[in-house]
Amino acid sequence: MNINFFLILALLLFSIGVVGVLIRRNAIIVFMCIELMLNSVNLVFVTFSSFLGNLNGQIFVFFIMTVAAAEAAIGLAIIIALFRNKSTINLEEINILKW
Amino acid sequence: MVNYFFLITALPLLGFLINGLLGYKVKGRLPGIIGSLTVLGSFVISVIAFFNLLGVTPDQRRITIDLYNWISSGNLNIGIAYLIDPLSIVMCLIITGIGFLIHVYSIGYMNGDKGFARFFAFMNLFIFAMLNLVLADNFLLMFLGWEGVGLCSYLLIGFWYEKKFTGDAANKAFWVNRIGDLGFIIGLFFILQYFHSLNFFVVFSALNPLTVNAGIITIITILLFVGATGKSAQIPLYVWLPDAMAGPTPVSALIHAATMVTAGVYMVARCSAMFALSPITMNLMLIIGACTAFFSATMAVTQNDIKKILAYSTISQLGFMFMALGAGAFSTGIFHVTTHAYFKALMFLGAGSVIHSMHDEQDIMHMGGLKTKMKVTFITFLMGAIAISGIPPFSGFFSKDEILSSIYSSGNYAVYVIALLAAFMTAFYIFRLVGLTFFSNARYDENNVHPHESPNLMTIPLIILAILSIIGGLIGLPGILGTNIFDKFLEPVFSASKLTLHESEISSSTETILILVSIIVAVISVLLSIRVYAKEFSKEKFAESSLYKLIQNKYYIDEFYNAVIVKPLRQLSELLYKFFDLKIIDGAVNGSGKFFDSLAADWRRIQTGVIQDYAILSVAGIVAILIYILFL
């Protein structure tokens, strides 16, 4: 198998994630896009680990998955809190972070 | 050697801290007692140190106490270190001894004042600063004390700060002193540059008459002398001292007798080895001293305020001291400091006693006939007056006569005549004061003012000082009458200057004539003064003449300084304020604020608050960086 297939797939996934973060207005979707980016990076790690025969990459993947799980819990909690306060999760309406 | 001698300065500092921090909580006389006891303590230790010095041979009379390494930078090491030698111990004894008596007197004088504790705190700080000045073993620590006495004089002159004129007088004293201090500190920089040290011992041992650069020495000594004219109230910086009378009377006594004004004389004496190398500075001191002694004596003759007379008298006596220094008779200058401390402290405290009983009346035109009402004050004051007039065997006679003969033997006959005239006027104005205050007819409202003798706390210091004024001069007998113990004691300190200055001895017959001349001058003057002022008196005979008015207005020197220095400075400041401060400084500050404010008015629109806008910008940035790295 050619390593490029895996890398291009990872690149596509990552790009989808970035574009999703940038253009979607729904906080949940944005959040899922972030997860997508993390997992595309995981894919790169695993690919190189397998091709180079080095386990370090897989160890990193476990770390990232752990952190992503924790982050998912916190992120969802924030979104829920946000919804309770503002009755919306539309990111365009949450714009108090300015002058 | 035992080094508990550092307590000499530590005790007054302790007193200052106790009175300053806790005094406001205490009612009654306790702060005064604490203040007096600490000064008494340092007096006792000074006496012990004095006997320690006497116990060793003259060339070993030198104790150094290193307390703390203050500044250490490269080759420069400046310590908080004290030097106890004959010169500094004499000054210590004067400062703490007279200072203690003044403290005791103040307990009576300041009784009931609401700033009682504050007063004693400042007085102790004053003593502390002055002791640092005289005990320092390097120029910088001396400068610390030098500034300290300036600060304390400011605090004490302006002690009754509710009145505007006391504040003005305090400011004036501070500012005039600053001018002198500027000269002093520039002198210190020159010393540091040229000798690479500020330690007295190092600097003075580097002075070799053959190799030293005379120009530099002249510059340094003149700058130091400028400092001395400020502290010791010499022409042209004497103007602060008469105004300093705004403070409480014991403060005047302290400033005039024990601390502050003697600082300049002490400093010149301490640096005698350096001054002796510069004939120009020595002559300058002689001339300035003579002018000061003469002109301030004329001013004293026409003043009516009892304290102002004494103030001008102090300036005049300081002029005598500087004449002695200028004539190369350093120990004589210090001798006059000593005797002057006795009788001037005595007269100021006596004047305070008079003012106290006259309900704050200070004009001698409204006094008279007090000799029966205030016996102790009268007799002690009379002793002081005789002493300052120079009538033997009172203390002032010996020191003044020694000054006159040292000027004569230095060959400056014109200065000698001026000094003699000043001595004549000294006796005249002081007996004018005595005559108008204690003799003569009562010119105050006898129904409302009932003069009475002051309490014992005030009279006992007067009596002690009177005794000192009578016998204190015997330590410095002139050559024809015996040995001058005082000169001998100070000899090791001035040995270096003695080597450079070739003293011309005068024969004992000349000395006898000089002594007789000064006695005759003093006696004639006293008799003349008594004839004019010790009888029925209504007003001055020549009060309407223009010369009298000129002198009474102090030659309009204050007005002159106001017009020539103060006013232009004010106008310049006004101009600078309106132009430089308001336009340039404020303009720069406000302008930069406005500039960024107007920039922000447009640019802040990119801060939308929508988080994704920020994310787009940061992604765009990353992409730009990637493109730069990969393709460019």
Image (cartoon, rainbow, N blue to C red):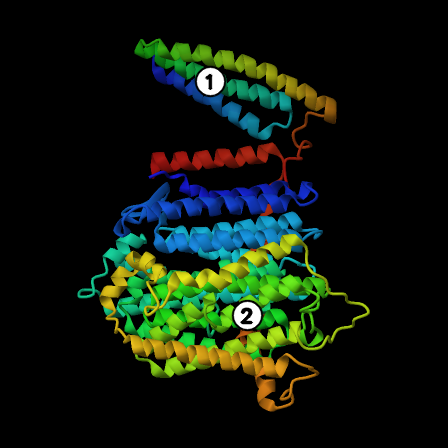
Q: Are marks 1 and 2 in contact (CB under 8 Å)?
A: no
State which quadrant residue B309 falls in.
Answer: bottom right
B618 in relation to B390, above or below: above
Q: Residue at x 35, y 14 (%)?
A: A48
Kindly state the secondary structure of the residue where label 1 is placed: helix
B106 in relation to B384, above or below: above
- Amino acid at circle 1: Ser
Label 1: few (<14), some or many (≥20) within 10 Å?
many
Q: Residue at x 48, y 54 (%)?
A: B95
- Amino acid at circle 2: Ala
CA separation in Å, label 1 and label 2: 107 Å
Label 2: few (<14), some or many (≥20) within 10 Å?
many
Q: Residue at x 30, y 78 (%)?
A: B509
Q: Point out the residue furthest to the right here.
A: B447
Give the residue at mark 1. Answer: A40
Can marks 1 and 2 be said to lie on one chain? no
Q: Which mark is residue B534?
A: none
Instruction: Name the spot of residue B188 as percent of width and height, x first.
Output: 35, 59
